[in-house]
Amino acid sequence: MTKTIVITGASDGIGAAAAAQLNRLGHEVVVIGRSREKTRQVASSIGADHFTADFSDLRTVRELAETLQSRYPRIDVLANNAGGVFGTRDKTLDGHEKTFQVNQLAPFLLTSLLMPILVNSNATIIQTASIAARLYGNIDITDLENDRRYSANKAYGDSKLENILFTKELDRRYRSDGISAVAFHPGVIRSSFAAETTSFGMKFLYANPLTKRFLSTADEGAEQLVWLATTSPGLGWHPGAYYEKHQIATRVNPQSDDENLALELWHQSAALVGV
């Protein structure tokens, strides 16, 4: 069965690689990216539709949702893959800490606005999370934007932990409506991912020529996203779970199993984006 698959953050890295792999499998891929030119190039190379949105501006996320709803009668897979790790504690035009908005609030808003069509499509919703959720995540629900305790690593780790909590709460709320939500860690990928960060650790890992040669390729990182997008939930994988290397992760941040935290994060995210 041919699926309509929307991938955010698809102008580079594993998003672009997944778009190409899914296109080769015969699926209708919709490429979403921030850079107009890079997004156009990726989409043109596989003959796919493309749209741009800057997740640091929630107005463009709302416009993207409207466009997708008007163009596609069904969306079988929404892959919330866009994200980043940044440096200093910057605020967006919307007034939110940039990492929190780009990695959590924007995908939360896009998913919420598309929910009617996603439910009608019995869609799979995929979150690209990270091992950083376990290494650096430590959410204070009274300080989601890290006003009191900011570091680039903590902000990123918190946001990836929030992606896992969002997945679990999506599953709790919408599984009975036909939604299948899942999160995964793609591995440490050789890409431009950490180009904007001032974190020494992230720079050393992602931008150091000595370490980059040992990182996985974008194609290798994309393979797990493709697996989740093309196999049957409940058979190939379990909805509501967080995966590493095709297996449900066993070493996780204890907060990722906190149902009350997931619920409160949902409520606060909804209030902050107005849905």
Image (cartoon, rainbow, N blue to C red):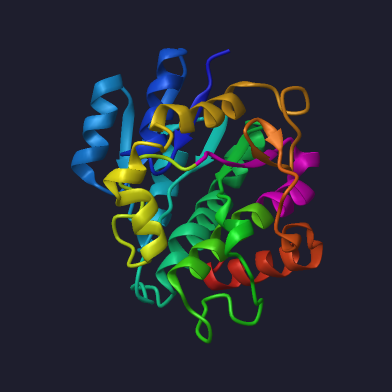
Q: Is residue 183 left or right of residue 225?
A: right
The answer to whether residue 172 is magenta is yes
Give the image location of residue 89, x and y in percent.
38, 77
Q: Residue at x 52, y 40 (%)?
A: 187
Residue with the most extreme front position: 210
The magenta segment is 167-187
Q: Position of residue 224 (x, y in %)?
A: 56, 30
One can see residue 74 in this view: no
Which sits in the foreground, 6 or 104? 104
Name above or below for residue 154 compared with residue 142.
above
Q: Residue furthest left?
A: 37
Q: Position of residue 199 (x, y in %)?
A: 38, 66
Q: Position of residue 210 (x, y in %)?
A: 31, 44
Residue depicted at 51% across the width and 30% down the height: 73
The residue that appears at 30% across and 60% down in the rendered structure is 196
**Among the 4 quarters of the image, the one containing residue 21:** top left
In the image, taking residue 23 as reference, residue 258 lies left or right, namely right
